[in-house]
Image (spheres, rainbow, N blue to C red):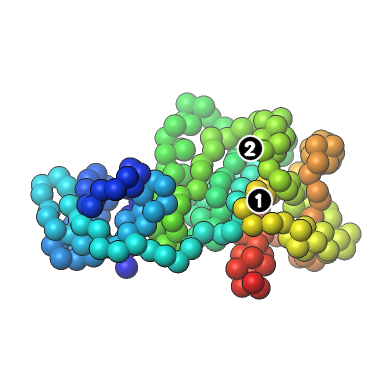
Amino acid sequence: MQRYFINEKYSGQEKVIISGEDYHHILRVMRMTEGDEFWSVFLNSETALVKITQITDSSVEAEIIKWETVEKELPVFVAVASGLPKGDKLEWIIQKGTELGASQFIPFNAKRSVVKWDQKKAEKKVLRWEKIAKEAAEQAHRQKTPIIQSPIEFKELIQLGENFNWKILAYEEAAKTGEVGNFSKILQRVQPSEKILFVFGPEGGISDHEKGLLEEHGFQICGLGPRILRTETAPLYALAAVSYHFELMR
């Protein structure tokens, strides 16, 4: 059943009113009519099944029928920090990472990033990423949309890491030397509701200098198995591993 995130908190209201792009999606794409039902997610993650009671020229009005009781979010907060990759790879990471449960996406300018961030296009780019994340969260039946960070510099990434319980650098050179246990050991120590920051390099990887700075500031080095993963594949591998550990093994 279709799901929509609405831009208001639940504060006791008995109905929701939807307009804008979601209104047009309900009418033009889903072709819903009065009496049809869908899920509505409030800003505070309260999620209700609602039934359309009225359709006007600019909005859809629906009454709340019942509340969703199943938890859909990962029990830990996972942020994905990606060295700016080429082309539309970041859009892919955001879309698929949202489906897998990521809570935040943090693009950053790495030494080996081929793409350089254009501030003139910043607002439009971030809005597009937010739209991709919203649509992916709706498709995946999540109860929250991820936080989309405007790209930051490497030193800002290190500072941001102070807000996390666990800081991990997925480092391909670790995989090449046979390191296999760190990621699993860390996940066994992470507690529900804690926050994990994963750092992934761009196509050329993280430089030795960047690796050294991250280690100095408490980031732990992990390999992701014996195969070398692309910059857009590694975050999805990590998120799938987190989901398996916390949701399928409990």
Write down the quadrant of residue 37 in the picture: bottom left
Point 14% across, 58% down: residue:
53
In the picture, the disc for residue 194 is: 1
Instruction: Find the residue positioned furthest to the bottom.
Output: 249
Residue sitting at 67 percent across and 30 percent down?
A: 156
Q: Amino acid at mark 2?
A: Phe
Q: Secondary structure at mark 1?
A: loop
Q: Which residue is the extreme one toward the top?
A: 120
- Residue 177, position in %: x, y? 89, 59
Res. 169 in view: yes
Q: Which residue is denoted by mark 2 in the rendering?
A: 108
**Residue 145 or residue 89, whichever sits in front:** 145
Residue 118 percent location from the top left of the image:
53, 30
Q: CA distance from mark 2 to mark 1?
A: 23 Å
* x, y percent for residue 140: 44, 62
> What residue occupies the far front of the structure in this picture?
12
Foreground of the two, 84 or 166: 166
Quadrant showing the N terminus:
bottom left
Amino acid beneath label 1:
Glu
Helix, strand, or loop for circle 2? strand
Q: Is residue 136 visible?
A: no
Query: Residue drawn 20% across and 57% down?
Result: 63
Residue at coordinates 45% horizontally, 59% vertically from top-left?
142
